[in-house]
Amino acid sequence: MGRSNENNPCLIGGATNIQGGLRMEVEGNRRALSNISTNVVGVLPYPCAVTKRGLAEKNGMCEKKPVISLHRPITRRFAAQMANKQQQPVTKEIKKPVPPISKPIEEDCTIIDVEDYNEVINDDPVPMYVKHTEAMMDEIDQMEEVEMEDIVLESVDIDSCDAKNQLAVVEYVEDIYAYHRKTESSSCVPPNYMSQQFDINERMRAILIDWLIEVHYKFELMEETLFLTVNLIDRFLSCQTILRKKLQLVGVTAMLLACKYEEVSVPIVDDLIVISDKAYTRKEVIAMEKLLANSLQWNLSAPTPYAFMKRFLKAAESDKNLELLSFFLIELCLVEYEMLKYPPSLLAAAAVYTAQCSLNRFKNWSKACEVHTKYTEDELLECSRLMVTFHEKAGTGRLIGVHKKYSTFKFGCAAKSEPAQFLLEMSL
């Protein structure tokens, strides 16, 4: 009842103006909000609709203008708040200028074609996206080269199939063969050591080795035993002069020591005496055993061709035929004195290479064989050609122990295979 009309928002500008004597009816003659707001003293006109220009429109892009309409009546308190906002300085946010495109954008927001865009950027001889593409292609090429290197490395990895085999010692196998290669020179003998022997010669040595191969086959001993026996004989003869009548005793005793080192079931001394036609007594065998062991300083851990043969055959992915033929060739070399000039690793690699050439009838030496043997094909040719000559004359003459052994079905009749004669023809 006694409240002032100034505090009544419903009567501001729309109620009866008592001081002016004019009565304005609200009903039927409603004025616009823009005219109503002028009745408020000290307040700037308030628009009925606020239109804000968006950032996209400032940059030349078309966008719908947002419309903000007022839905509440204007009060003095609200008008005062608006006046304070207008008096406060407006801080504009600084935007980074967008680099203009040489071709102006149309007002109707037309889509620029790819050809037009290429014309716009034709000032730059090498566009940026082309540079990125070239760099990416270079990285892809490098990745392909690395992958090819990985493929080559995988192709020469021969131990992955034995990763779960504890007896294969995959973690140490490379170190083991590196040690064998390092120490094989110490197990080799001078190729002319027979010159210091005054009562024996190369022919007598060949007869002894050929006979021991037959004894080895009759006793059914391991292959390691035969190769170690020959190694002990050569090392002993290179440092001790022996009479002709004691040469067979040296051979029998060397086999006895090799059996004690390699075999599980060792032949007794009496068996060795019987097989030598009782040419020696037990006491003589024991005395020669002591002399031989002391002369070699009890060093029986010599890397023989057999140790390398198993590794190189694995690198060649051999089958039974290749394995038997390789051992046939390497045992032929045991009889020949002139083959002492080659280290055991080279003999083993040449035997595998020659056997591959004999079976395949062409030269065959894979990358895996070259990596694991450390010998190229050219380095093996000289030794391989000698093996071919031994293969050709294996069944002739008096020394036929190896040929008889490998002519049986137990050894796959490997001695009856054709020699690789084309290797000899290449040298002519």
Image: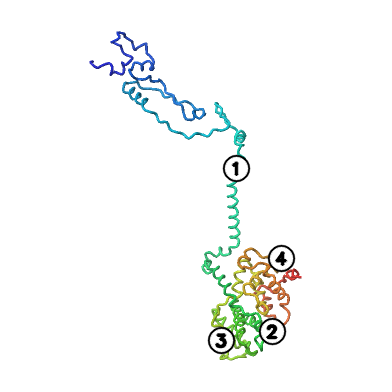
Q: Is residue 262 left or right of residue 412?
A: left
Q: Please tell me the numbered disc located at residue 357.
A: none
Against 5, residue 307 (above or below) is below
Q: Position of residue 275 (x, y in %)?
A: 62, 86
Q: Secondary structure at mark 3?
A: helix
Mark 2 vs mark 3, CA separation in Å:
24 Å
Which three-letter amino acid code belongs to the residue tagged 3? Glu
Mark 1 vs mark 4, CA separation in Å:
51 Å
Q: Quadrant of residue 306?
A: bottom right
Please give the residue where the numbered disc 3 appears in the rendered image: 289
Q: Quadrant of residue 410?
A: bottom right
Q: Quadrant of residue 355?
A: bottom right
Please name whichever residue, 238 or 277, is drawn nearer the observer in this view of the structure. Answer: 238
Q: Position of residue 311 (x, y in %)?
A: 59, 69
- Badge 4, how many Cα within 10 Å: few under 14, some, many 20+? few
Who comes first in sequence, dot 2 or dot 4? Answer: 2
Q: What quarter of the picture does the N terminus occupy? A: top left
Who comes first in sequence, dot 1 or dot 4? Answer: 1
Mark 1 vs mark 3, CA separation in Å:
82 Å
- Badge 3, how many Cα within 10 Å: few under 14, some, many 20+? some
Taking the spot 71% from the left edge, 65% from the top edge, the residue there is 362
* Image depth: mark 1 or mark 4 in front: 1
Against 282, residue 37 (above or below) is above
Q: Please tell me the numbered disc located at residue 130.
A: 1
Please give the residue where the numbered disc 2 appears in the rendered image: 203
* Image depth: mark 2 or mark 4 in front: 2
Please give the residue where the numbered disc 4 appears in the rendered image: 362
Who comes first in sequence, dot 1 or dot 3? Answer: 1
- Badge 1, how many Cα within 10 Å: few under 14, some, many 20+? few
Who comes first in sequence, dot 2 or dot 1? Answer: 1
Please name whichever residue, 7 or 263, is drawn nearer the observer in this view of the structure. Answer: 7
Which three-letter amino acid code belongs to the residue tagged 4? Phe
